[in-house]
Image (cartoon, rainbow, N blue to C red):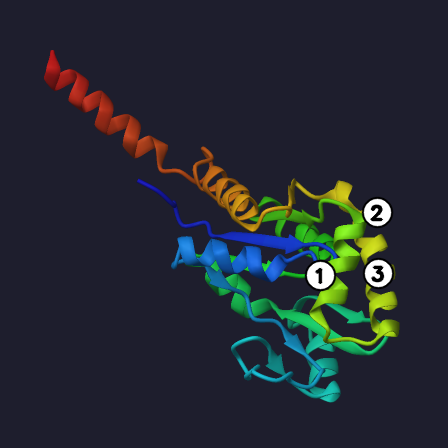
């Protein structure tokens, strides 16, 4: 039994440094059929990143053309510098074919996706166990300046302030537990009556019951 043709878009948000990527990777290790939705961005690739794997790296002009023509499901400017967006067509094709996508975006993008896709989008907020833990995680990365950390913490406040718009909250204190919780959310959504092929199961069970008599 299983999916009736409607895919699931698992939208994952949370403050920078909370470990969203690690939790998502853990989910995808458990369920290899879950796909990561690749966003596009105007920033330059970081060390180890490649085009069409982590992001679609495009120019400012290309991004603006996509935005103006309605090719983006959602988009945002991050820290008043670079633009990020989700290609609409790729997401719609995946959902139409019954696949499960994970999309890692901020709360503004999550709100836009919910408005356009309704309950096909499952909104999950990854929260830190404490503010101190979040600050320590950002500092331990040693990848950003103090000013960049201050900017990320300011954005983190905004993310946390909007936690109430999400369907689920996962506190990432222990990664394994957070992965388990995210997995449970996905499995629960896959088994809802609107998505599970319950009519076929009902008919099979009733037919078996008739034969048993």
Total numbered circles: 3
Q: Residues within 10 Å of mark 2 (few under 14, many from 20)?
A: few
Q: From the image, tell me which residue sits under label 3.
A: 153
Structural crowding at the residue carrying mark 3, measured as other residues with C-alpha within 10 Å and reported as few (<14), some (14–19) or many (≥20): some
Residue 161's label in the rendered image is 2
Q: Is residue 88 left or right of residue 76?
A: left
Q: How many residues crowd around disc 1 within 10 Å: few (fewer than 14), some, or many (20 or more)? A: many
The residue that appears at 62% across and 52% down in the rendered structure is 117
**Quarter that holds the C terminus:** top left
Label 3, label 1: how many angstroms apart (C-alpha)?
A: 9 Å
Q: Is residue 113 above or below residue 150?
A: above
Circle 1 is placed at which residue position? Answer: 17
Of the pair 199 and 112, the residue shown nearer to us: 112
Instruction: Relative to 188, say whether 112 is above or below.
Output: below
Element class at badge 2: helix
Instruction: Specify the label residue 57 is tagged with.
Output: none
| Residue drawn at point x = 54 percent, y = 41 percent | 181
- The span from disc 3 to disc 2 (Cα, nearest Å) is 12 Å
Q: Is residue 75 above or below residue 130?
A: below
Which mark is nearer the camera, 3 or 2? 3
């Amino acid at each position: 039994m299983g999916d009736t043709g409607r895919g699931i878009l698992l939208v994952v948000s949370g403050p920078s440094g909370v470990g969203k990527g690690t939790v998502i990777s853990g989910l995808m290790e458990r369920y290899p059929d879950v796909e990561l939705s690749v966003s596009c961005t105007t920033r330059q690739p970081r060390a180890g990143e490649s085009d069409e794997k982590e992001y679609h790296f495009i120019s400012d002009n290309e991004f603006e053309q996509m935005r103006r023509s309605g090719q983006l499901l959602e988009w945002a400017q991050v820290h008043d510098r670079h633009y990020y967006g989700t290609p609409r067509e790729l997401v719609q094709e995946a959902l139409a074919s019954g696949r499960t996508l994970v999309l890692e975006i901020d709360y503004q993008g999550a709100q836009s996706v919910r408005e356009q896709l309704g309950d096909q989008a499952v909104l999950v907020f990854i929260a830190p166990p404490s503010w101190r833990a979040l600050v320590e995680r950002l500092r331990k990365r040693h990848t950003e300046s103090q000013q960049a950390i201050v900017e990320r913490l300011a954005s983190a406040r905004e993310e946390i302030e909007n936690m109430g718009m999400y369907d689920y909250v996962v506190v990432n204190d222990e990664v394994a537990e957070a992965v388990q919780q995210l997995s449970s959310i996905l499995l629960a959504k896959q088994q809802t009556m609107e998505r599970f092929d319950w009519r076929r199961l009902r008919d099979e069970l009733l037919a078996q019951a008739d034969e048993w008599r």
